[in-house]
Amino acid sequence: MRKPNEPVEELVYQGRIKVPYTWSVGEVGSRFFIELRDNQKIFGKRCPACRKVLVPARKICGICSKQTEEWVEVGNQGTVQTFTVVRYRSDVQPLKPPFGYGIIKLDGADTGMAHLLYGSDPAKWKIGMKVKAVFKEKRTGNILDIKYFEPI
Ligand SMILES: [Zn+2]
């Protein structure tokens, strides 16, 4: 019998699970993604209480819990608030490294949006650098219709 604190061999089993599913992005998400897909425009919604422009557009303000109503087009350029650089290659990564994951506050928005950073030398990237959205040529109505944000 092992003692309670004695190290134990770690057993690992490999499994595979496939779960097909569909889900609705809702009324607000649909309009947001349709604007990306059809017009390469990025929209937020303004909270009627705190007046912040929330991007991506949200039905409810996360700060005030008020329902948003006013749509606001924001710029396709913004400022990097924070980021990390990915330098390893993996089949699950969306881009060839090096690339970054960042929070970008678009011009006219009050909240940051998570997305990919790509282009130029990541060693030169800085918090506060200006970036612009690069759209895919063939868009399908999801957040990756913006291929990534590149430094300008
Ligand atoms: Zn609010």
Image: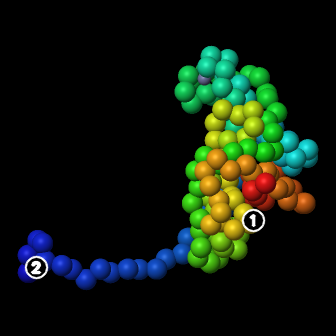
Q: In the figure, 33 relative to 57: above or below?
A: below
> Where does ligand 1 appear, by image quarter?
top right
Residue that carries the numbered disc 2 in the rendered image: 2
Q: Quick one: 51 or 78, which is closer to the camera? A: 78
Name the residue located 57 percent from the left edge and 30 percent from the top edge. Answer: 62
Query: Label 2 to label 1, Cα distance in Å?
Result: 55 Å
Residue that carries the numbered disc 1 in the rendered image: 119
**Marks 2 and 1, the one that precedes in the sequence:** 2
- Name the front one of labels 2 and 1: 1
Residue 67 on image: x %, y %:
65, 22
Residue 73 on image: x %, y %:
82, 33
Q: Amino acid at mark 1?
A: Gly
Residue 41 on image: x %, y %:
85, 42
Q: Is residue 144 visible?
A: no
Q: Amino acid at mark 2?
A: Arg
Q: Quick one: 6 or 16, which is closer to the camera? A: 6
Residue 65 on image: x %, y %:
56, 24
- Numbered disc 1: secondary structure: loop
Within the image, what quadrant is residue 12 found in?
A: bottom left
